[in-house]
Image (cartoon, rainbow, N blue to C red):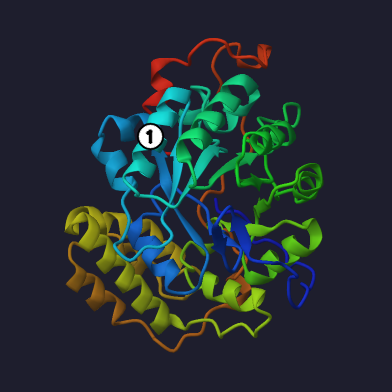
Amino acid sequence: MSAAPLAPAAPPPTRASVDPLRLHDLEVWPPVVLAPMAGVTNVPFRTLCRRYGGGLYVSEMVGARGLVEGDATSQLKASFAPEEDPRSIQLYAVDPDDAARATALLVGEQRVDHIDLNFGCPAPKVTRHGGGAALPWRRDLYAAIVAATVRHAGDVPVTVKTRLGIDDEHHTYLEAARIAQDLGVAAVALHARTAQDRYGPPADWRHITRLVEAVDLPVLGNGDIWEAADALRMVDQTGCAGVVIGRGCLGRPWLFRDLQAAFAGEPLPPSPDLGQVAGLLTEHAELLVAAFGTYTGLREIRKHTSWYLQGFPVGRTLRRSLNLVESLDELRTLLAEVDRDIPFDEDMRRQPRGHTTRPKKVALPHGWLDTREHGVPLGAGAAVVISGG
């Protein structure tokens, strides 16, 4: 069952008082970051989003071990469009040596301008091995991975993305941010939920405020930014230096246009009608086919189809047919039948999309919570994870 729409928020400030986001020598304006999302933030999706506004557009999570070993999937996830600038990648590592070697590879080939470390993924296939949101609990291992990445990154800024912790009894974010600051990271992004929360309860922005007050480096806020007004409100309420956009842009790449306008204090452009959305959906499919081939590209567009058409009265038959298309021509023919003048349903603006997973006990290695010190390597399965949840 889909989650209920979020209640309308209080009126936002007319403009956030915020400077460009500075990650060492890298300046980002507006201070907006596309969150790494598995199976979503690939080159085609980033290409669409970047057309609408400035910001930092991060790749899908890439496993450090797979990257070093030349795994084809990891190599594909670490690819960029020729015109993509800056080039930002999220790295997943559970071993300091893997982190060091992958970072040296990425920086040595001048492939990236920014590296983000994943310590926030709540997916069971990641946390059950001690990775993602589980890893900061073992603070010595966490510190070693961050230190190895920063050391081998040189002048390339490194950031850390984390959650509040494992659950409400095992918060890690304040300590993790202080460790990261001492080790030279450029910023910390906080998804204001625990791993146990998954994507269910509302994000608790009070923790973003607490983190801003606890460290002397830029803090980026993440969680429940469905429209530009939410971003202004988060900056105003928490004092964060910028925002991280996840599910809010699914089926809505034009959100980055709205964010650009909002942070500049300009009126928001009108929402697209169904004809414009259909054109965008078609272009997204074309980009996916060009990148991955017809078979894979058309299967990749299926999850995006429901997000793009959310709230539009197009009927079940068309939705079902779009999920069965075998060619771009068939997709174009189906979308040519829609009433192009149907306006965007503003009541659906805050309807959740993507993950709606309710709170669930976090899968962890046996005895994980018994100690904060690590001391021994994680199991072999931890390093071979190459995709997030």
Residue 118 pos. (x, y %): 52, 38
Around disc 1, counting alpha carbons within 10 Å, would you say few (fewer than 14), some (14 to 19), or many (20 or more)?
Answer: many
State the residue in front, 372 or 183. Answer: 183
Q: Which image quadrant is residue 363 in?
A: top right
Q: Which residue is located at x 47 percent, y 69 percent?
A: 253
Q: Is residue 28 left or right of residue 333?
A: right
Residue 272 pos. (x, y %): 48, 82
Report whether residue 38 is seen: yes
Q: Which residue is located at x 22 percent, y 55 percent?
A: 292
Report whether residue 362 is seen: no
Q: Is residue 12 left or right of residue 71?
A: right
- In the displayed structure, 243 sits above or below 363; it is below
Mark 1: which secondary structure?
Answer: helix
Q: Amino acid at mark 1?
A: Ala
Furthest residue in direction bottom, as rendered: 341
Q: Which image quadrant is residue 6 in?
A: bottom right
Residue 85 pos. (x, y %): 40, 62
- In the displayed structure, 210 sits above or below 252; it is above
State the residue in front, 15 or 342. Answer: 15
Q: Which image quadrant is residue 333 in?
A: bottom left
Question: In this figure, what is the number of numbered marks?
Answer: 1
Q: Which residue is located at x 34 percent, y 49 percent?
A: 111
Q: Which residue is located at x 18 percent, y 62 percent?
A: 326
Residue 205 pos. (x, y %): 75, 51
- Residue with the mark numbered 1: 102
Q: Is residue 86 left or right of residue 71?
A: right
